Amino acid sequence: MIQAYNRLVERFNKLYRFQHLSAITRWDQSAMMPSGGNQARSEALAELSSLMHELLTEEQVGQWIKEAGESADDLVTQRSIREMERSWRKASVMPADLVKAQSLASSKCEHAWRTQRPENDWKSFSANLKEVVKLAREEASIRAAASGAKGYDAMLELYEPGMTSSELDVLFGNLKSWLPETLQTVVEQQQNDSLIVSQGHYPTENQKALGLDVMKLLGFDFNHGRLDVSIHPFCGGVPEDVRLTTRYNEADFVESLMGTIHETGHARYNQNLPEDLRALPLGSYRSMGVHEGQSLFFEMQLGRSPAFLQLIRPLIVKHLTENQEDKRFSQTNLEKIYNRVKPGFIRVDADEISYPMHVILRYEIEKALIEGDLQVDDLPQVWDEKMQAYLGLSTGDNHSIGCMQDIHWPMGAFGYFPSYTLGAMYAAQQFSTVKRQLPDVENRISNGDLEPVFSWLTDNIWQQGSKLETHELYTQATGEPLNADHFKQHILSRYLTS
């Protein structure tokens, strides 16, 4: 057993080093690479994906897992083998030629999307997307046959181990039963607010300086990471070298600041995963829903709270205005700006009440796409119908603010979108527990003492890696598995309590 397990550790260490290279080159492809390099970069990444697939799926790896599992006698090793087997099974069902084809197709589609979206070029985009969807359906079929799950559930498993579309239908059905009415009530209630809008002139360098100061406040380790710019904000890299990106609008600072805070939540999770297990699946993040739970904890639960806005207000004033009495940046107005509820077209700019409806729309569409109940050519019409039904808005023929707006489908990441709203629920449950265990936490936050919050997250979520299944992780951390009531109570408390 010891020899077999040691061989597995050695193999996963090698894979982790290749993952490092892949992550940094993909970051560069999105943030720094000249456009003319995309074809060569895509081919290089496809070769690397094939090599990593071969290393993970070699027959001897399965044999090592079997041998190690038969005699593992301590809990940590048993869990480590469980996660290694999970990774191995996910990869081993996939033919190498399909892995390579998907890498090439998604790189082509994503790269072209970066210019096709601003040009609203649906015809060209859809041609590329059809190939990505065709390959995703092939993957879903293969994974479903191997696991006995439905096609979409097999894809969902890649991002949310243990979650099913049946469970999502219940969770999202609950949201749809109360969220639209709450949205309408809050919008009507806020119409009477004397809000001073945030529009103005905010140079990019000032916004970046503000973002960097807030990242320092949030504990980001700049010795192991950096902030850059991309069309679509993201957090990539590896724990030793985390790469964040944001984007800037010189007419409005709101988007970039909260986008930076959001990605910093992802980064803090990555930087605080268990170091001694970092190269092994056991030391990785539990799921994308848990990952989004950290970023949304930072952005929504913490970042938009009155206590945190009070803390960062001096930084906002320092970097964005020379007038200390500028009423746009009063405490009251900042709270109104950052908790303004108004249905809009763009998911990443959505308020936290509208946001779940954006996710549910995408979930329903991508499930139908993967199951073959919806074709790519029908996407614009179905998107517009659902936008009208859920948010009262019509995208019409402007696909750049409709079905072309997100990077996930061009990347082939079908099954990812539910993670965002699951993350909002996890974030609410985490902060509810923190407030219960630390009754004075809001006073501490407003006074700049964030360490108790970070210590709770580190001990209960970040350092746990993938040692526990998701329901076990949250039961241990909060006293119960996922409970959507925490999200509902958060929304009602923040927006409807006068």
Image (cartoon, helix red, strand yellow):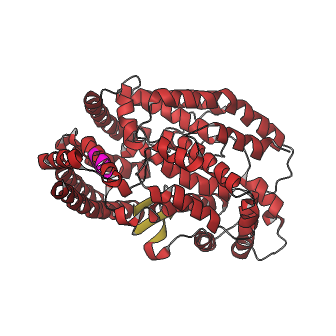
Whether 339 is drawn above or below 491: the answer is below
Q: Nearer the viewer, residue 299 or 474?
A: 474
Q: From the viewer's perspective, is 233 left or right of 324? A: left
Q: Residue at x 22, y 54 (%)?
A: 52
Q: Is residue 33 left or right of residue 198?
A: left
Which residue shows up at 65% across the image and 54% down it?
434
Q: Which residues are magenta?
A: 80-85
Quick check: can you spot residue 428?
yes
Is residue 321 part of the magenta span, yes or no? Answer: no
Query: As drawn, which residue projects farthest toward the top?
Result: 373
Asked if residue 279 lies left or right of residue 199, the reply is left
| Residue 298 placement: quadrant | bottom right
Question: Going by the image, does 186 lie left or right of 398?
Answer: right
Q: Position of residue 181 (x, y in %)?
A: 73, 30
Quarter occupied by the C terminus: top right
Tell me where residue 340 appears, x and y as whole percent: 74, 49
Task: Give the residue at x 59% y 47%.
Answer: 478
* Residue 331, image x, y percentages: 81, 63
